[in-house]
């Protein structure tokens, strides 16, 4: 049985209790500005994205009206079904729900320094096992009005369409994730830093198994909103070069390189069911949220639970402690 949870920052502070899911909304005081809302989006096919705007409770009423559609091209957006407008509207009456409808336009931020507009063309939902206190979701498929999604990373952010593209998003300075590899010297220095962290956190049995095995490295470079560079690095130790060999230890860290490489936060391995020694977050995309804010889209796994998370990047914060803008999680 799949268990789905969603934590969505709607300009509110949501408190999640482990015994269930309870949202306690914070509403701004009189005259206080409501923060801009952002939602995760994923590539549905060549020119459409899938978006879940809100968590709801269907209470078993969806089956008679649902229309089966193909699953999305990317993971973690489940298997939505098409729903009629009249059915969606009943779940949008609360003040903090997004009042989306067919034909609405939203800005699509792809992390490549470009902005596009998507038009909502199909209303969707995803029903979960609500009987144990979990959320279902309502949302839409949006069609990109110009261009294709095939050369993008597949995970995006959408926000309300203001009618004009801001000057910061027109900037030639790329705020986001870079595809090109970092230099060998920098990678070597980062590997040494992560090796020190491995020796600090790994159990004696793990360190004995590793012995003198060199780490396999993946270093991702990205620029944040203030224009400076940051890095997310993952290191794993295993015997042999076969990619199918399970690592003996894995660790990751957020870093900066100026004036010299320095670790800002360490991602220690979380236990998981089928990933050997554990799991560290995967960085899927980096998005310019404007107003000096940088968003990171992360894929997390802990135990039997997977989570797709949009968070606001902050120096010194781990994936678990970065402020959540939206997250969608699933477990067994």
Image (cartoon, helix red, strand yellow):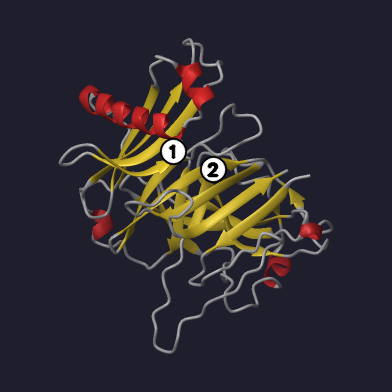
Residue displayed at 51% across by 72% down: 12
Task: For marks 2 and 1, give the CA distance.
Answer: 17 Å
- Residue nearest the observer in this picture, 39 or 145: 39
In the image, residue 265 above or below residue 91: above
Question: x, y (%) of residue 40?
Answer: 51, 53
Q: Indicate whether 133 appears above or below 2.
A: below
Residue at image location 33% in from the left, 48% down from the top: 114
Question: For the view shown, which residue lies furthest in the front direction?
Answer: 204
The N terminus lies in quadrant: top right
Residue ID for mark 1: 153
On the rendered structure, is 119 left or right of 304? Answer: left
What is the x, y in percent for residue 188? 26, 24
- The quarter in which the C terminus is drawn is top right
- Is residue 117 something one can see in this rendering? no
Q: Which residue is mark 2?
A: 300
Position of residue 1 in the picture relative to residue 317 (left or right): right
282 shown above or below 206: below
Q: Residues within 10 Å of mark 1 (few under 14, many from 20)?
A: some
Identify the residue at image location x=46%, y=66%: 37
**What residue is shown at x 21% (from left), y 50% (from top)?**
227
């Amino acid at each position: 049985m799949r268990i789905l949870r969603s934590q969505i920052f709607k300009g509110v502070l949501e408190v999640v209790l482990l015994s269930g899911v309870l949202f306690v909304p914070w509403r701004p005081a009189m005259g206080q500005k409501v923060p801009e809302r952002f939602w995760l989006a994923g590539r549905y096919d060549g020119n459409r994205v899938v978006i879940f705007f809100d968590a709801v409770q269907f209470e078993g009423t969806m089956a008679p009206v649902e229309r089966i559609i193909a699953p999305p091209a990317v993971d973690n957006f489940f298997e939505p079904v098409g729903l009629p407008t009249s059915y969606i509207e009943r779940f949008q009456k609360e003040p903090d729900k997004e009042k989306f409808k067919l034909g609405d336009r939203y800005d699509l931020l792809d992390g490549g320094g470009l902005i596009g507009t998507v038009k909502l063309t199909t209303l969707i939902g995803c029903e979960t096992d609500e009987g144990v206190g979990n959320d279902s979701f309502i949302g839409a498929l949006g069609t990109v009005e110009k261009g294709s999604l095939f050369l993008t990373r597949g995970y995006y952010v959408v926000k309300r369409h203001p009618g004009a593209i801001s000057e910061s998003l027109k900037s030639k300075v790329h705020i986001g994730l870079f595809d090109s590899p970092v230099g060998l010297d920098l990678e070597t220095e980062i590997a040494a830093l992560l090796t020190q962290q491995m020796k600090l956190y790994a159990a004696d049995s793990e360190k004995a198994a590793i012995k003198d095995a060199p780490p396999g490295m993946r270093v991702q470079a990205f620029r944040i909103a203030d224009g400076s560079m940051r890095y997310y690095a993952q290191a794993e130790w295993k015997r042999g070069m076969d990619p199918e060999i399970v690592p003996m230890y894995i660790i990751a860290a957020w870093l900066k390189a100026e004036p010299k490489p320095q670790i800002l936060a360490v991602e220690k391995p979380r236990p998981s069911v089928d990933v050997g020694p554990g799991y560290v977050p995967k960085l899927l995309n980096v998005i310019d949220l404007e107003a000096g804010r940088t968003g990171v889209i992360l894929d997390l796994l802990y135990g039997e639970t997977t989570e797709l998370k949009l968070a606001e990047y902050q120096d010194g914060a781990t994936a678990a402690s970065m402020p959540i803008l939206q997250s969608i999680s699933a477990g067994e």
